[in-house]
Image: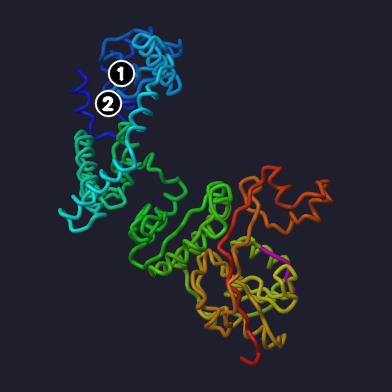
């Protein structure tokens, strides 16, 4: 069996050329031949063994510097040099040698001649050239500053599509459209599914000899595994999603977009969304840009997805109207919840976990706690008045009107003059929501707050105030930011919060 026969028999199997197990199971005789031929070759991959077998080549692949060269692919063979650095050195040396032979000087450049040519061209000469160009454009297009950017873009799209079509001939896919953002819509003839690929991701797949279809070959998409998990979870709820959509926000990417109900989900890796890579207003500005387009953009943070995945999934399900279990408050009993039970419930069901409180009110269904609201006074929020601190339902539960029942109970028993609360904009994309329907009035939007990234987790800045850092022995002459940067600890900014107030007279 030659290479073309082997490729034809396996063209529908993604990654077959380097899969030793697949080859040994499907083609045992061929596997034996390859193994016997390459038995004298040590420390090479199975892909290299197949290449050597087909090429009948047992020579050691050594670079001019003495290092081993890498195999690019079965089709392309080995690269000429061991690395880009070595290739550059060789190119520089070849140019120097050529200059030595031609001009007697390895560092020769013809700058003198260039300067002479440029110096002879007067301002008048340059003006004449520019004027001639403007005149031609005016006569031909009616505009002396005409540039046919649209034609250039179309020409580029046509050229890109032609190049891609020539590259994908060995795969069962077809290009449906080259979009303005240089991304591609393709259809797989094997599975019949359509995919949307950015140009960079498309190129990576073709360069590595990988099937471009992200349905059949969901690897090396340029999408993180966490993003893919989120997309697959939403698909499991019965929704069609778009991955890496750049059309809706005119070039900015929405990681996972649900067109049917105009909701987008951003997966925010902590390092890549820290101050190292993004500006303070980045997340909230992107959310506001989406809102103008009628899209609710939800931000999911890396540490929340890693450590509180069940809570995040429950919130996503609720947003998409797919909560598993619905219970009405008339079937529930209402009572105060002990401190330990409250803390346990919040840590298991609220994305921010528990926090100190003075009063906890819960709804019980058949003696099971299914919803909770906590109230208290916190100086950290900027007010020492009554504050709604936490509200959440049990994972997978929806209790329509449950919050209203708990709020009414608190007002009746405590008689507050005013209650404030805050909503995290990462999950709350507009000010008019269930708080407003329960008598709260939106009063302000807080700017994005910063957190510190400690061991792949966001930590509240309150624990890293300058006064606390000084107590730990850090230089009192330096600012909090200077101390934290010297420790290699980055900040990350959230989306800010909405502030609401309930007043007795309203």
Question: How would you classify the magenta stretch by its main secondary structure?
Answer: loop
- Depth order, front residue of 108/403: 108
Q: Which image quadrant: the N terminus?
A: top left
Dot 2: within a 10 Å radius of its alpha carbon, few (fewer than 14), some, or many (20 or more) residues?
few
Quarter location, residue 379? bottom right
Residue plotted at (22% across, 47% down) = 132
Is label 2 in contact with label 1 (beta carbons under 8 Å)? no
* Magenta stretch: includes residue 171: no
Relative horizontal placement of residue 312, taking residue 44 as reference (left or right): right
Quarter location, residue 102? top left
Residue plotted at (36% across, 58% down) = 250
Mark 1, residue position: 50
Give x and y (percent) for residue 262: 37, 66
> Relative to residue 411, is residue 347 depicted above or below?
above
Residue plotted at (22% across, 20% down) = 3
Magenta residues (range): 354-358
> Relative to residue 105, is residue 118 depicted above or below?
below
Quarter location, residue 368? bottom right
- Depth order, front residue of 345/294: 294
> Relative to residue 482, is residue 448 depicted above or below?
below
Residue plotted at (52% across, 75% down) = 431
Dot 1: within a 10 Å radius of its alpha carbon, few (fewer than 14), some, or many (20 or more) residues?
many
- Depth order, front residue of 64/229: 64
Camera-nearest label, 2 or 1: 1
Mark 2, residue position: 26
- Secondary structure state at the residue bearing disc 2: helix
């Amino acid at each position: 069996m030659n290479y073309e026969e082997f490729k034809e028999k396996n063209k529908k199997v993604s990654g077959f050329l380097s899969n030793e197990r697949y080859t040994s199971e499907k083609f045992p005789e061929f596997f034996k031949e390859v193994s016997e031929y390459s038995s004298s070759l040590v420390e090479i991959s199975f892909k290299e063994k197949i290449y050597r077998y087909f090429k009948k080549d047992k020579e050691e692949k050594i670079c001019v510097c003495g290092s081993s060269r890498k195999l690019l692919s079965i089709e392309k063979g080995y690269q000429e040099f061991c690395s880009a650095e070595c290739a550059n050195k060789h190119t520089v040396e070849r140019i120097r040698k050529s200059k030595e032979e031609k001009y007697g000087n390895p560092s020769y450049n013809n700058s003198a001649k260039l300067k002479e040519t440029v110096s002879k061209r007067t301002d008048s000469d340059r003006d004449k050239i520019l004027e001639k160009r403007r005149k031609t454009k005016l006569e031909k297009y009616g505009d002396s500053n005409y540039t046919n950017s649209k034609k250039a873009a179309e020409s580029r799209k046509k050229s890109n599509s032609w190049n891609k079509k020539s590259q994908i001939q060995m795969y069962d896919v077809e290009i449906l459209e080259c979009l303005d953002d240089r991304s591609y819509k393709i259809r797989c003839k094997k599975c019949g599914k359509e995919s949307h690929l950015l140009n960079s991701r498309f190129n990576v797949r073709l360069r590595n000899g990988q099937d471009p279809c992200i349905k059949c070959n969901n690897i090396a998409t340029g999408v993180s595994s966490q993003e893919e998990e989120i997309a697959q979870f939403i698909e499991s709820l019965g929704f069609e999603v778009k991955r890496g959509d750049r059309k809706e926000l005119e070039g900015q990417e929405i990681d996972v977009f649900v067109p049917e109900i105009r909701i987008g989900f951003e997966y925010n890796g902590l390092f890549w969304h820290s101050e190292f890579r993004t500006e303070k207003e980045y997340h909230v500005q992107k959310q506001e840009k989406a809102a103008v387009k009628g899209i609710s953009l939800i931000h999911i943070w890396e540490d929340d997805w890693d450590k509180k995945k069940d809570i995040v999934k429950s919130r996503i399900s609720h947003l998409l109207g797919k909560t598993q279990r619905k219970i009405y408050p008339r079937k529930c009993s209402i009572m105060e919840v002990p401190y330990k039970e409250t803390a346990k419930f919040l840590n298991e069901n609220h994305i921010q976990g528990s926090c100190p409180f003075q009063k906890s009110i819960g709804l019980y269904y058949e003696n099971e706690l299914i919803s909770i609201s906590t109230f208290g006074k916190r100086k950290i929020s900027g007010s020492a008045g009554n504050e709604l601190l936490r509200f959440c339902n049990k994972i997978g539960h929806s209790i329509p009107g449950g919050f209203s029942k708990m709020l009414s109970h608190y007002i009746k028993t405590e008689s507050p003059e005013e209650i404030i609360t805050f909503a995290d904009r990462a999950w709350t994309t507009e000010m008019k929501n269930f708080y407003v329907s329960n008598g709260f009035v939106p009063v302000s939007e807080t700017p994005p707050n910063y957190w510190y990234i400690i061991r792949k987790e966001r930590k509240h800045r309150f624990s890293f105030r300058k006064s606390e850092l000084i107590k730990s022995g850090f230089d009192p002459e330096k600012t909090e930011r200077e101390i934290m940067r010297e420790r290699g600890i980055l900040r990350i900014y959230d989306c800010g919060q909405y502030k609401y107030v309930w007043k007795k007279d309203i």
